[in-house]
Image (tube, helix red, strand yellow):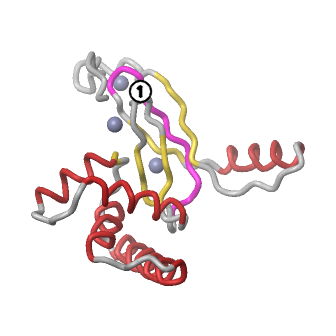
Amino acid sequence: MQKETREQALQAEKIFKASMKEEGYRCTQERLTVLREIYSSSNHLDADEIFVRLKKKEVSISRATVYHTLDLLFKFHLVNKIDLGHKHTHYEKSYGVGNHLHIICEQCDRVVEVHSEELNTLLDRLCEENGFTLGSFSLQVFAKCQDEGDENKCEIKTAKPS
Ligand SMILES: [Zn+2]
Ligand SMILES: [Zn+2]
Ligand SMILES: [Zn+2]
């Protein structure tokens, strides 16, 4: 892990521990493992993927605990929920991560993250015009890969994960 990422993970863990304490949740090892798994990854994971990754690492955790922990992390603003067009929700770390846009290929599921000052300014203005102050955002746009020849072939996935 890069130094910056490690620092980000440690801070997020601190906040998680403090928030759980404040709200009367037990700070269990399992819950912390879920947070660490998300913060050590730059992917957009769904609950089952997290569960499977932890199982592979021989962490004893139930699916229910993974789901419940994700809800807690969301409640404490430590993860973002994103919709990649699957039937389930994906999660990504949010502490120390700037607002961004996800461009998702409808055919091959490729996801690219875009940080844009221009977009920030635009959304800021749109909120303002409608009587809001912009908070945070995590947006999705569905698109199609441009033809880049054989090497970067956009493979159509016929079976979408359910
Ligand atoms: Zn998925
Ligand atoms: Zn993202
Ligand atoms: Zn594609």
Q: Is residue 75 above or below residue 19?
A: above
| Quarter of the figure with residue 56 | bottom left
Q: Which residue corresponds to the image point at 31% horizontal and 23% vertical from the top-left?
A: 160
Residue 95, image x, y percentages: 50, 67
| Quarter of the figure with residue 36 | bottom left
Q: Which residue corresponds to the image point at 39% horizontal and 59% vertical from the top-left?
A: 68
Residue 154, image x, y percentages: 30, 22
In depth, the one of 143 and 50 nearer the eye is 50
In depth, the one of 114 and 93 nearer the eye is 93
Residue 63, image x, y percentages: 26, 53
In depth, the one of 123 and 16 nearer the eye is 16
Q: Which residues are magenta?
A: 97-108
Residue 24 included in the magenta stretch of the image: no
Residue count near mark 1 (Cα–Cα under 10 Å), binned few <14, some 14–19, many ≥20: many
Q: Is residue 1 above or below residue 144?
A: below
Q: Which residue corresponds to the image point at 47% horizontal and 45% vertical from the top-left?
A: 113
| Quarter of the figure with residue 111 | top left
Q: Which residue is mark 1?
A: 105
Q: Is residue 95 above or below residue 3?
A: above
- In-image side of 120 versus 104 (left or right): right
Q: Is residue 21 above or below residue 159?
A: below
What type is the residue that disc 1 sits on? Cys
Residue 85, image x, y percentages: 44, 29
Q: Which quarter of the rendering shows the C terminus?
A: top left
- In-image side of 148 versus 82 (left or right): left
